[in-house]
Amino acid sequence: MSTNALSSFFSGLRWPYVLAHALIVAAANWAVQYVVPGTNEFLTWGAFVFPFAFFITDLCNRRHGVEMTRKVVLASFVIAVAISFIAADPRIAIASGVAFISGQLVDAQVFNRFRQHAWWVPPSISNILASTVDSTLFWVLAFAGTDMPWVSLGLADYAIKIAMVFIVMPVYGYVVFRDRVAAA
């Protein structure tokens, strides 16, 4: 990539979103290594952390458009993978990177496709589809072939991600309506 291309890429990049993504991914990669007590080893703490990455993606997309969101996701990907190699096992870091970039780009594209619908439609559809991509890639790449009960953990993780879409939705709605009032 040339200096001009790099300069163009970083021009106007929304760093708070980039840093939020990186922090969320690193925290989720660390937390996925720990099972929630009382869940018979079918649920990790990472399931509760990672869905906030989709929230960040959707806010960026809503406020700054899909092109900026793609830039944010790409920059976040580089930082998150680097941090993940420090915070988590290398296999988890690689699986997370592949799942993150794939899921987040699906989220950005699907959200953009449904942008003109009611405020809750784009994040609902994009998060469900992106969570499916992210969860499938992460759990297969991170744990297939290990003695960990990754299928049951992955299914529980996926169920929590889907539930979190609707738990976080009121917060997303509040921010959307606050933005509208501020713009008026």
Image (cartoon, helix red, strand yellow):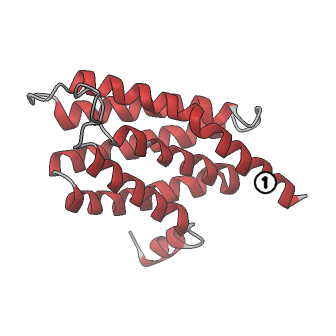
Q: Please tell me whether residue 170 is drawn above or below residue 124 in the rendered image.
A: below
Q: Give how far across and how far down residue 104 sits, in percent.
A: 47, 44
Q: Give how far across and how far down residue 129 sits, in percent.
A: 50, 28
Give residue 121's quadrant in the image. top right
- What residue is rendered at 51% in x and 68% in y? 9
Q: Please tell me whether residue 157 is drawn above or below residue 151 in the rendered image.
A: below
Q: Please tell me whether residue 19 is drawn above or below residue 37 in the rendered image.
A: below
Q: Give how far across and how far down residue 19 sits, in percent.
A: 46, 65
Give residue 76's quadrant in the image. bottom left
Q: Quadrant of the C terminus?
A: bottom right
Q: Give how far across and how far down residue 111 sits, in percent.
A: 62, 38
What residue is disc 1 on?
178
Callout 1: SS: helix
Q: Please tell me whether residue 140 is drawn above or below residue 176 in the rendered image.
A: above
Which amino acid lies under the numbered mark 1 shown in the image of this protein? Arg
In the image shown, does 133 or 30 lie closer to the viewer? 30
Give residue 115's quadrant in the image. top right
- Left or right: where 101 falls relative to 42: right
Q: Residue furthest front?
A: 38
In the image shown, does 172 or 63 lie closer to the viewer? 172
- Left or right: where 148 falls relative to 117: left
In the image shown, does 148 or 143 lie closer to the viewer? 148
Q: Quadrant of the N terminus?
A: bottom left
- What residue is rendered at 34% in x and 42% in y? 46
Q: Count the numbered circles shown.
A: 1
Q: Residue furthest right?
A: 184
Mark 1, Cα crowd under 10 Å, few <14 / some 14-19 / many 20+, is few
- What residue is rendered at 14% in x and 29% in y? 148
